[in-house]
Image (cartoon, rainbow, N blue to C red):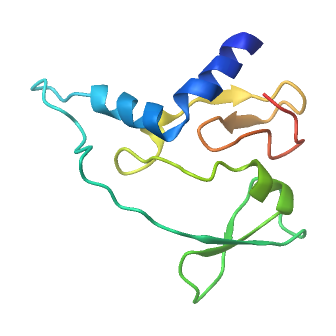
Amino acid sequence: MKDDEIRKYLNTKHDPQSQLKKLQTYTNAGNLPLFQTDYHESYQVRIIPDKSIAPAKFIPIPLRPNEFLANPVTIRAMRKELFMGGEDFVDLECLRTCQSCKKEIDLQFWQFCPYCEASF
């Protein structure tokens, strides 16, 4: 993908409404909808800044469900709303290599590179 295509992809494909529309297009072998898009679950998690945590990592806090430690850059870089289609996040996966640091990242999770802070 070229830079302008990536920008367009980020602006249109990862907002919550576009992600929902994408999931609605998936069908199973019987040509029936693969996902129940009228069923929603929301989860809130607490992300606590900790400069000792490596970039792009979330460390669960034992005995505190839905609470994680993360580097402050990671917290700024992460998207605040995420969609999950099935058992994991592969349905909306968009892997790219950062042009600056050469790390592979999944664009569905990040607003900018969580390793080097480069914009996409």
Q: Is residue 2 above or below residue 104?
A: above
Task: Establish if 54 lies above or below 92.
Answer: below
Q: Position of residue 48 (x, y in %)?
A: 74, 74
Q: Give percent across and percent down for residue 91.
A: 42, 36
Instruction: Kindly give the residue lying farthest to the left in the view shown.
Output: 30
Identity of the residue drawn at 27% across and 43% down? 37
Q: How many marks?
A: 0
Specify the quadrant that holds the C terminus.
top right
Viewer-closest of 18 and 86: 18
- Relative to residue 8, is residue 27 drawn left or right? left
Residue at 64%, 48% (x, y): give it: 79
User: For this view, does 93 lie left or right of residue 105?
Assistant: left
- The quadrant in which residue 51 appears is bottom right
Residue at the bottom extreme, as displayed:
63
Give x and y (percent) for residue 111. 72, 40
- Furthest toward the front, the residue is 17
Q: Is residue 73 above or below residue 110?
A: below
Q: Please indicate, yes or no, whether residue 21 appears anywhere in the rendered image.
A: yes
Which residue is located at x 75 percent, y 53 percent? 56
Q: Residue at x 15, y 26 (%)?
A: 29
Q: Quadrant of the N terminus?
A: top right
Question: Residue 107 placed where, x, y %?
Answer: 64, 35
Most foreground residue, 34 or 102: 34
Q: Confirm whether residue 54 shows in the render.
A: no
